[in-house]
Structure formats: C-alpha cells, structure tokens
Amino acid sequence: MKNKTLVMLTLLSAVSFASLAQTQIIAHRGAWKNTNFPQNSIASLNAAIEQKLWGAEFDVHLTKDDVLVVNHDIDFYGIDIATSTYEELLTKKHPNGESIPTLEEYLKEGLKQDEVTLVLELKTNKLGTERTLKAADLTVAAVKKLKAKKAVEYIAFSYDACVHLRELDKKAKIHYLNGDKTPRELKDSKLDGFDYNLSVLKKHPTWIKEAKDLKLKTNVWTVNSEADMIYFLEQNVDYITTDQPELLRTVQEKK
Ligand code: MG
C-alpha cells in the first residue's frame, strides 16, 4: 500500500513538473538592444551567454570566395556579402571595433561554454539555390569540424535548405522559418519544428497545438512587446525569440 502511494506521488509530481515546463528565451542576433553591442557581433553573443538564456540566434551568409560569415543584412556596412570576398569585408568594422566574424570564429567563441544553445540561421543566398545549398554544405562541415553538433540548432527560411540540412545530418535539430508550411508538412519532411513570425501564429491559432501533438518544437519571432510576450507565454510555446531577452525574463517572472 505504501509503495502504491509512493508511486502515485511520484507520478503526480512528474505531471506537475511537466505542466510547469517553461518557455525558453532565445536572444535574436545576440543580446544587442539593451547592451548597445552590434547585432551578430561576438560581444552580443557573449552578452547573451552572460544572461544565461536558453539560446543565442545569429545569421550566416556565404561570401563570393566561400567563407561563411556572421551578419544579419545581405551587406556589411555597404559591402554586399554574396558578391564580395572575405578580404573585402575586412575593410569595414563594427562600431565596437570588431571585424565581421567568420562562422568558425563565432562558433569557437560560443563553444567556450555549453549552456547556451547556438541557434544558427542559414541565410538564403541572393545568387540562387545552388549558393544557398553550398552554404549549407560548408556550414554543416564547419560544425562537424569544430565538434559543435550538440551546441548548434539550425533555422532557415529556405525550405530547400532545411531539407538539405536534414540530408546532411540526420540528427541535427532543424526548424523552418518561412511560415508557409503546416505542422504536418514539417513533420513529413522530418524537420523538428517551426520558428514562425508572430503574425503567422496569430493567423493560424491552431498550429501551436497541432505542432505539439506531432511532437514538433514551437518557436516564435520576433516577440518584443510585453503584450505579445504574455500572449505566447500563455500559448506555452517552447521558445520565444526576442530582441528584448531582459524584458521577457521579467515578464516571465511576474507570471
Ligand atoms: Mg536571424
């Protein structure tokens, strides 16, 4: 009888623990907004790491001479990345003095710790799908070379890139960004979940539950207002990607 009670209590506490599973915070382009560091700089990555968030997101582009670099826009202070060499990009600097980080430099910095997940957005190359897929090949190779597989999760707007990433690495975590696939379609393509714009998830209010029922991960970007933070915390999404990780943590603690 005593044993039965113990089993029941263990089960009950497991259930209540599961229901308390918290939405995790991902800093969008590192923690830059409240720190004044440049987006996607090594400094913004380290600021996200210092905040002990779940993840730090960053964007990866391919140069003309096949170097992977970390930046959001398709240009680095006016120099177009896809049609320029890495050497040409080094003629400009971030306002804090940093050069554009290569993917390898960025990953090496992130790998100095093992608590904050590195959320790697593979950017769509403006020169076409072939270059985007080449960027995927080189990215997966770099992650493998640096033994960063466990530290990295992938996101991409290009569905072709997501499917290609899955072919390259059967175990990688891959999430689709573009908002035009149902949870069922993502599951059928063996992707791990979605990372959709908040307007997409408001327009399709059943998708979060549908994804959860399919054991897909749910992530929403870019959630910066308190009202939207509360809306998605109440939806129990797995991750919220935000420019305001400090605010999201405060909102989460108040709830
Ligand atoms: Mg991004």
Image (cartoon, rainbow, N blue to C red):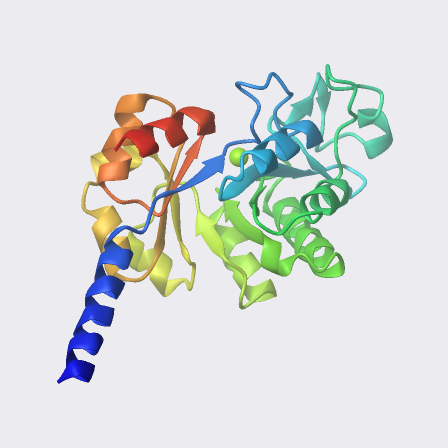
- The N terminus - image quarter: bottom left
Left or right of 201, for residue 69 = right
Left or right of 204, for residue 143 = right
Q: Nearer the viewer, residue 48 or 163?
A: 48
Residue pictured at 43% horizontal, 39% vertical? 25
Name the quadrant containing residue 140: bottom right
Outermost residue on the front side: it is: 2
Residue pictured at 22% horizontal, 38% vertical? 234
Left or right of 175, for residue 136 = right
Please tell me whether residue 243 is drawn above or below residue 139 in the rendered image: above
- The C terminus - image quarter: top left
Residue pictured at 36% horizontal, 57% vertical? 186
Q: Nearer the viewer, residue 98 or 214?
A: 98
Name the quadrant containing residue 97: top right
User: Residue 36: x, y in percent?
Assistant: 60, 16
Q: Nearer the viewer, residue 192 or 255?
A: 255
User: Residue 138: x, y in percent?
Assistant: 71, 53
Please tell me whether residue 113 is drawn above or below residue 240 in the rendered image: below
